[in-house]
Amino acid sequence: MAQLPDFDAADIKRRMNGAIDSLKHDFGGLRTGRASTSLLDPVMVDAYGAKMPISQCASVSVPEPRMLQISVWDRGLVIAVEKAIQQSNLGLNPQTEGQVIRLRMPDLTQDRRKELVKVAHTYAEKGRVAVRNVRRDGMDQLKALEKNKQISEDELKDKSADVQKMTDDMIKDMDAALKHKEAEIMQV
């Protein structure tokens, strides 16, 4: 399959894979009752006049299956890290001892599990929209090439079908990831 001057199928696939990676990263931040260091990835701390992820001002570990431990490197940032966790809407209550903050994972209620499933569905829809936007960009590139007589109408149909197949495959992967995350959240 010869590469077209302004159309790069590998770039389209890379961008779609980026949307899936982003979705999986978002799913990692959803609490399932088990402690995971990725749970704190979206939490940003006001430190040194800028917002930065917790991982840049502390080390996060999982000493027990239902507990996170955050060792803050700079004593002056302990309160800022604690405040960021409380404002993150993760439903976690930090317990501070010196420069160490412990987060015990509370049991998830059935209502909270349903809320988390809704959030997961929102993340998945955002991912699907991102994939569809990449598909639209690819289709626009192909139509422009056909309009400029750089490819034939048949090539346009073939390449468009390839882009659509990539899109369908990516959305199927996202739906499978959503189904897996939903089962993980609802697991009692």
Image: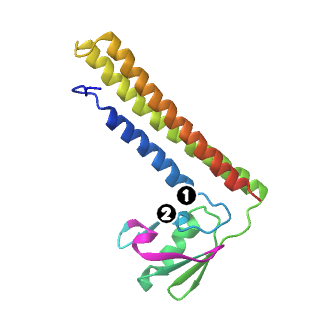
**Is residue 64 placed above or below 38 in the rendered structure?**
below
Tag 2: residue type? Answer: Asp
Residue beneath disc 1:
28
Q: Position of residue 63 (x, y in %)?
A: 59, 79
- Name the quadrant containing residue 185: bottom right
- Which residues make up the magenta segment? 51-67
Q: Quadrant of the C terminus?
A: bottom right
Q: Position of residue 34 (x, y in %)?
A: 65, 67
> Label 2 neighbourhood size at 10 Å, few (<14), some (14-19), many (20+)?
some
Q: State left or right for residue 72 relative to residue 172.
A: left
Q: Relative to the observer, which residue lies in front, 81 or 104?
A: 104
Residue beneath disc 2:
41
**Is residue 176 placed above or below 50 in the rendered structure?**
above
Q: Is residue 61 magenta?
A: yes
| Residue in the image at 73% along x and 62% along y | 108
Return the disc, 2 or 1, that comes first in the chain's sequence.
1
Q: Position of residue 178 (x, y in %)?
A: 61, 45
Q: Is residue 59 magenta?
A: yes
**Is residue 99 placed above or below 154 in the rendered structure?**
below
Tag 1: residue type? Answer: Gly
| Residue in the image at 65% along x and 65% along y | 91
Q: Position of residue 182 (x, y in %)?
A: 67, 49
> Label 1 neighbourhood size at 10 Å, few (<14), some (14-19), many (20+)?
some
Q: Contact, CB < 8 Å: mark 2 with mark 1?
A: yes
Q: State left or right for residue 56 relative to residue 110.
A: left
Element type at marker 1? helix
- Name the quadrant containing residue 109: bottom right
- Name the quadrant containing residue 175: top right
Number of numbered discs overlaid on the protein picture: 2
Q: Relative to the observer, which residue lies in front, 62 or 151?
A: 151
Q: Which mark is residue 126?
A: none
